[in-house]
Image (cartoon, grey):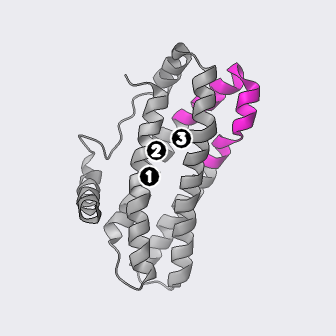
Amino acid sequence: MADILEAIQWDHANLAKLLDAMEAQLDRFDRGEDPDYDILRGVAEYCLNYPDLYHHPAEDLLLRRLRVRDPEGAAMVGALDAEHQTLSAKVHRFRDALDEVLKDLELPRAAFVALARDFVASYRLHMRKEEETFLPAAARALSLQDRAEVSAEAGPRTDPLGDGAQEEFEALREKLMRWARESA
């Protein structure tokens, strides 16, 4: 079993790739071109099905343990658990707005792009904060035993876009791999 801190960093790297793909599609949409709506929808569904259900709860468990082991370090990190709730609300709003766009309902292009870009920027800022403050604080304060216990409590986590991707995300994984090759 991989260390939970390494697993979180791996998740962040994967999510950053998804956000890159999403931004490329938003650039197209912003220019008046048709984006790949499957990528936009897939990123929203991914965030609702993996970070919201597995990644963030695991981080919340780590944060609770950090608050016990190093209250001062945890205080420096802040309320990441509250940020997880905010991110979840943003991804729900984005998915709902995307549904409106796909149904040809009245939603100004600029409003949709602003909402989507806020979602992307919020996720990037959150991950950077975790990488710069939370994960280093957890690495300093939590023993390998602490991290193993948190990992066990969090339960098994399989990234739906990783090897052996869940069927519902296989098409998104293929699109992202093709997009990455074409944009390289």
**Taking the image as drawn, is residue 88 in sight?**
no
Kind of residue indicated by mark 2: His
Q: Which residues are magenta?
A: 58-84
Residue 131 quadrant: top right
Q: Are marks 2 and 1 in contact (CB under 8 Å)?
A: yes
Estimate the spatial distance between the alpha carbons at disc 3 and disc 2, rounded to whole Å.
11 Å
**Which mark, residue 16?**
1
Residue, disc 3: 56
- Crowding around mark 3 (Cα neighbors within 10 Å: few <14, some 14 to 19, many 20+) is many
The residue at the point 39 percent across, 66 percent down is 40
Residue contact at pointers 3 and 1, CB within 8 angstroms: no
Q: How many marks?
A: 3
Crowding at dot 2, Cα within 10 Å, few <14 / some 14-19 / many 20+, comes out as: many
Q: Quadrant of residue 28?
A: bottom left
Quadrant of the rendering where the C terminus is positioned: bottom left
Q: Residue furthest top?
A: 145
Image spot of residue 71 (x, y percent):
75, 26
Closer to us: mark 3 or mark 1? 1
Above or below for 68 versus 56: above
User: Marks 2 and 1, how far apart in space?
Assistant: 6 Å
Q: Secondary structure at mark 3?
A: helix
Tell which of 149 and 102 is nearer to you: 149
Name the N-terminal-most of marks 3 and 1: 1
Whether residue 150 is situated above or below residue 103 in the rendered picture:
above
Q: Secondary structure at mark 1?
A: helix
Question: Could you tell me the amino acid type at mark 1?
Answer: Ala
85 over 145 or under it: above or below: below
Spatial separation of the CA atoms under disc 3 and disc 1: 15 Å
Dominant secondary structure (helix, strand or loop) of the stretch shown in magenta: helix
Which numbered marker is on residue 12? 2
Q: Identify the image quadrant of residue 79.
A: top right
